[in-house]
Image (tube, rainbow, N blue to C red):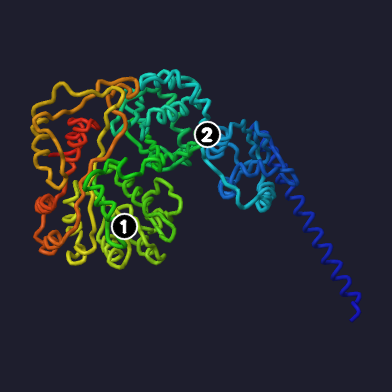
């Protein structure tokens, strides 16, 4: 149908209106850009219009899209030495913190500029063109050359303080981390006190003061650690948790970071999580004799529960990981539920609980069982719901490994019953319970036969040896008991100890113990008597045997085990 003259006039009029609207939008955009340019002059920062600005992927990728949108900021220039960031409000604290973070993490000089919302939207469109598999990492790379550089100056713990108290903050952090690796520290503590700031290392389970820091260095150091671990630098009044990775010597070591507010400032603890893969043989962990044979047999069973007990830091998780690696074979599906996942194990499905999203041990375990696993490890059994689900799993064809907090193997069964677990389900579900502690091992460079042993310690040791079950078939000359000591040397930083080993007790289920559980007339003392009658070597006895072998000292054994 031909278009009438009236319709032609209406179409032309519509086109004119659209053109006018487009021109008005352009005028408004230009007005906003002009206003922004004037505002930038007042603020004393550069102004940039990002419309059709050539932004490289290297620049844009410096800030993840989600964070860029949240902060209304974008990196539009990066040449490897200098970067420029455009923001709606360059004077905001969050933008200044972002600039500091980019400078410290990427070793760049960052300049801030003011941009409009229109400029940001143009830049945000470019994120769609970035590779979707781009990985943003917080790895802290400590070069081998750095370790070699300080090797000659780090002869003992006392040498760390003079190296840390220097102006270069980057080196101060690297020195603390590198020295912790050199001296095999498991944790680094940075604590604010009234008289100053104390830095301490936990070496073989014992805290050692290694340096006192000036407050001006301490604030910057904590900010840098927060930066690495993805924590909020400006939040100092509530606890925060994060983690980062040290890449050194071809290996990656995870560092778990915790901060809490204290009266004199924040306290920071960094836990170095070294992969234990090189030391996960049961014999290397300290298991021996009948206990070693028993545990090897128990992990070969197709179903049931194997429980480890002991306080925090007693090596329970490492023992369970050793069992998992023995079980990790083709045709076996293993799933773990942990809080947190400390070590990543190849070939094993590891899941981390998240209480904030109601992914607890109990709910996570029910989900795991729907994944058709052969072996399940639960980081800890804390409540009746988790305990009941774990027992049902053990009774329905799964091998389940877990931990529970008690003083020893005999205390685990009363603990389960106090949770409300039904005795007639617990008895057939349990296979074995391990109690354990970690003791420091004597330094091989300076250990020697002890010239004199405290009479009270010798009396305790003698009684323990005399009551070791005959099944162990030990050949000990009771008239000539010989123990060892160490004077301290450079190899052990003067402590006399280097490294740690486990002392264990293994309670194996049998008909007699099952009957005791079913009687419900049970206490930790009763359970201990029955276990001992059935041939269990206690942790204290295992420790004394290791002291006789020159592995540790009587003082160390009785420091960690109450007799």
Instruction: Classify 10 Å Cα crowding around label 2: few (below 14), some (14-19), many (20 and above).
Output: few
Image height of 137 relative to 334, above or below:
above
Quadrant position of the N terminus in the picture: bottom right
Count of labels in the image: 2
Q: Report the residue marked by disc 2.
A: 141
Residue 496 place in picture, x, y as percent:
27, 24
269 and 456: which is toward the camera = 456
Q: Which mark is in front, 2 or 1?
A: 1
x then y, percent, for residue 459: 8, 32
Task: For mark 1, give the secondary structure.
Answer: loop
Q: Residues within 10 Å of mark 1 (few under 14, many from 20)?
A: few
Residue displayed at 45% across by 22% down: 151
> As drawn, is 555 to the left or to the right of 456?
right
Q: Secondary structure at mark 2?
A: strand
Q: Residue at x 38, y 50 (%)?
A: 325
Q: Quadrant of residue 357?
A: bottom left
Is residue 39 something one can see in this rendering? Answer: yes
Q: Is residue 387 above or below residue 196?
A: below
The quadrant the C terminus occupies is top left
Q: Is residue 170 left or right of 447 when viewed as pictured?
A: right
Residue 494 locus on image (x, y percent): 30, 21
Q: Residue 85: name its quadrant.
A: top right
Q: Is residue 354 visible?
A: no
What is the number of the mark on residue 300? 1
In the image, what residue occupies the spot 48% across and 33% down? 224
Image: 470 above or below 511: above
Disc 2 from disc 1: Cα separation? 41 Å
Residue projecting furthest to the bottom: 1
Q: Nearer the viewer, residue 167 or 110?
A: 167
């Amino acid at each position: 149908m031909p278009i009438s003259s009236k319709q032609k006039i209406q179409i032309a009029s519509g086109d004119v209106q659209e053109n006018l609207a487009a021109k008005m939008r352009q005028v408004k955009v230009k007005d906003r850009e002009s206003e922004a340019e004037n505002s930038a002059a007042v603020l004393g920062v550069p102004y940039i219009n990002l419309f059709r600005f050539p932004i490289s992927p290297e620049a844009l990728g410096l800030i993840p899209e989600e964070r860029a949108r949240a902060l209304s900021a974008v990196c539009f220039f990066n040449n490897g030495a200098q970067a420029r960031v455009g923001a709606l409000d360059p004077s905001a604290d969050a933008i200044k913190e972002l600039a500091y973070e980019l400078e410290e993490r990427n070793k760049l000089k960052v300049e801030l500029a003011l941009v409009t919302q229109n400029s940001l939207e143009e830049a945000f469109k470019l994120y769609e063109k970035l590779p979707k598999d781009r990985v943003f990492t917080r790895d802290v790379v400590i070069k081998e050359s750095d370790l070699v550089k300080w090797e000659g100056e780090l002869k003992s713990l006392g040498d760390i303080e003079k190296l840390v108290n220097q102006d270069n903050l980057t080196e101060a952090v690297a020195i603390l981390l590198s020295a912790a690796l050199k001296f095999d520290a498991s944790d680094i503590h940075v604590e604010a006190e009234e008289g100053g700031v104390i830095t301490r290392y936990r070496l073989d389970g014992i805290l050692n003061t290694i340096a006192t820091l000036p407050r001006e260095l301490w604030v910057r150091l904590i900010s840098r650690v927060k930066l690495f671990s993805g924590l909020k630098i400006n939040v100092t009044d509530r606890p925060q948790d994060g983690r980062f990775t040290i890449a050194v010597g071809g290996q990656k070591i995870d560092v778990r970071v915790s901060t809490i507010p204290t009266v004199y400032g924040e306290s920071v603890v960094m836990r170095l999580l070294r992969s234990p893969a090189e030391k996960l043989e049961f014999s290397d962990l300290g298991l021996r004799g009948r206990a070693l044979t028993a545990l090897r047999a128990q992990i070969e069973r197709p179903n049931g529960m194997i429980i480890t007990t002991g306080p925090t830091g007693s090596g329970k998780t490492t023992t369970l990981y050793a069992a998992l690696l023995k079980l990790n074979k083709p045709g076996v599906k293993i799933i773990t539920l942990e809080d947190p996942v400390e070590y990543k194990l190849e070939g094993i499905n590891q899941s981390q609980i998240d209480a904030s999203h109601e992914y607890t041990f109990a709910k996570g375990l029910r989900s795991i069982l729907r994944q058709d696993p052969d072996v399940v490890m639960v980081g800890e059994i804390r409540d009746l719901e988790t305990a009941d689900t774990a027992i049902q799993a053990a009774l329905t064809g799964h091998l389940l490994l877990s931990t529970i907090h008690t003083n020893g193997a005999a205390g685990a069964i009363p603990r389960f019953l106090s949770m409300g677990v039904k005795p007639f389900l617990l008895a057939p579900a349990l296979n074995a319970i391990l109690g354990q502690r970690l003791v420091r091992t004597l330094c091989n460079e300076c250990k020697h036969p002890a010239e004199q042993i405290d009479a009270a310690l010798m009396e305790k040791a003698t009684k323990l040896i005399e009551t070791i079950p005959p099944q162990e078939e030990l050949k000990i000359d009771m008239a000539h008991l010989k123990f060892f000591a160490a004077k301290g040397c450079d190899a052990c930083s003067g402590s006399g100890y280097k490294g740690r080993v486990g002392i264990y007790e293994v309670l194996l289920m049998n008909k007699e113990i099952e009957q005791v559980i079913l009687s419900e007339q049970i206490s930790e003392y009763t359970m201990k008597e029955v276990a001992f009658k059935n041939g269990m070597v206690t942790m204290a006895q295992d420790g004394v045997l290791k002291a006789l072998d020159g592995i540790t000292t009587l003082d160390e054994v009785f420091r960690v085990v109450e007799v």
